[in-house]
Image (cartoon, rainbow, N blue to C red):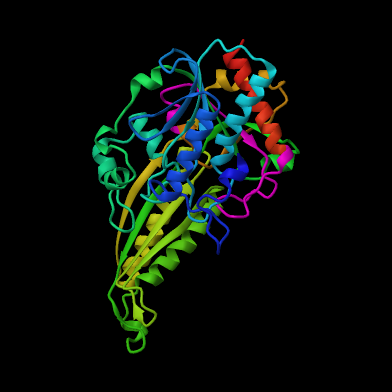
Amino acid sequence: MWADLAPIGRHAASGGYRRHAWTGADANCRTWFQEQAEARGLTYETDRNGNQWAWLGDPLGEDAVVTGSHLDSVPDGGAFDGPLGVVSSFAALDELRRRGAQFRRPVAITNFGDEEGARFGLACVGSRLTAGRLTKEAAYALRDADGITLPQAMEAAGYDPEAIGPDPGRLARIGAFVELHVEQGRALDLTGDAVGIASAIWPHGRWRYDFHGEANHAGTTRLADRRDPMLTYAETVLAARREAELAGAVATFGKIAVEPNGVNAIPSLVRGWLDSRAADQATLDTVVSAIEAAAHEAAARQGVDLTVVRESFTPVVEFEHALRDELATILGGRVPVLGTGAGHDAGILSESVPTAMLFVRNPTGISHSPAEHAAEDDCVAGVLALADVLEGLACR
């Protein structure tokens, strides 16, 4: 399975993956998922929001146990973020069949669409729509860098955008959702464990900063006469690092757009996107407020106009303690429990169904990069742990 997925959406120059929502690479990943489902005799379906499902047992049955993750990527992302969870889910089902497991609850494997938000700027679109945490109107307003709207992209990919929206009936039939994911950090590497259990997802959000200055000639405009938004943006980037470090949080400006974007032109507009995360809401609020205050101070000093728009936000997610403890019991009680600053579909679904997560060791801690990696032995340990969990939840 891993070898079949490996070439899909891989960029020859960077070695990273560009599996963005509703593109050709995404379609090929979706075809792969359907083929894996059908090869195992599972009932395959796509829901109203474009999420894929592969069912063992009655898709309309109650108290189902669901696992899976996503197959899309960030720009030039790694091979493991998302796909490891989907591949491991199919492999865990194969392992349970090898064991002769008898299922008393329906089991499903899922691929949630547009988890990374790389194309339209909003993460977890498929699960947000399903859980009613993204309205149809807001989804229709999403556009990519080329001005293509989400419904246009879905329609071009052969899906009906008119159908999107909350799916409470489907969620009501799910008794537990367990997502396996490569760890996006080095906590497991530091403890020496191959597999861990998630405790919580840090609150996190994305903010767009629009710095409006005055376009002018780079060679003839005196420094004192400039209204240069790039200078204000640069000060804001440094402020983000400073405030995050002081608070023990993280803050990153990882995306920028410049107009007119000429080498010999002072910009008229610099647009930067801030991603910030912290262990608790109060700390995140403190960091984000301090960054915005520093940006406004710099903008006023340099004659630049600034607007800040919060584009997305996800509050802290405490995974259901009872399910988390049940996973720990199934896995022998000695599995480390750790928090994470990364968002996941499991976090979005947590308000609607009991959710839990398993992490597989990432020896370098690198993620969202071609250097992302997990050793084969650790991946196998993750599959076996997931198989044990599914057996404990669905077969006993």
Q: Is residue 375 magenta?
A: yes
Q: Is 154 left or right of 44, judged from the image as shown? A: left
Query: Where does the image place residue 265, in percent across and percent down from the top left?
Result: 34, 80
Q: Residue 33 versus residue 245: which sits nearer the camera?
A: 33
Q: Residue 10 versus residue 330: which sits nearer the camera?
A: 10
The residue at the point 43 percent across, 59 percent down is 255
Q: Is residue 244 magenta?
A: no
Determine the main secondary structure of the stretch shown in magenta. Answer: loop
Outermost residue on the right side: it is 192
Q: Is 356 left or right of 137, judged from the image as shown? A: right
Q: Residue 61 versus residue 181: which sits nearer the camera?
A: 61
94, above or below 282, in the image: above
Query: Where does the image place residue 130, in percent across and percent down from the top left?
Result: 36, 30
The residue at the point 73 percent across, 42 percent down is 190
194, above or below 264, in the image: above
Q: Magenta segment range?
A: 348-377
Q: Is 187 left or right of 179, judged from the image as shown? A: right
Residue 160, picture quadrant: top left
Which quarter of the figure is the C terminus placed in? top right
Residue 188, picture quadrant: top right
Q: Is residue 394 visible?
A: yes
Which quarter of the figure is the N terminus placed in? top right
Q: Is 228 left or right of 85, judged from the image as shown? A: left
Q: Residue 103 versus residue 239: which sits nearer the camera?
A: 103
372, above or below 203, in the image: below
65, above or below 213, in the image: above
Q: Is residue 388 visible?
A: no
The residue at the point 58 percent across, 16 percent down is 393
The residue at the point 56 percent across, 51 percent down is 7
Give the tally of numbered discs: 0
Query: Where does the image place residue 87, in percent across and percent down from the top left?
Result: 58, 36
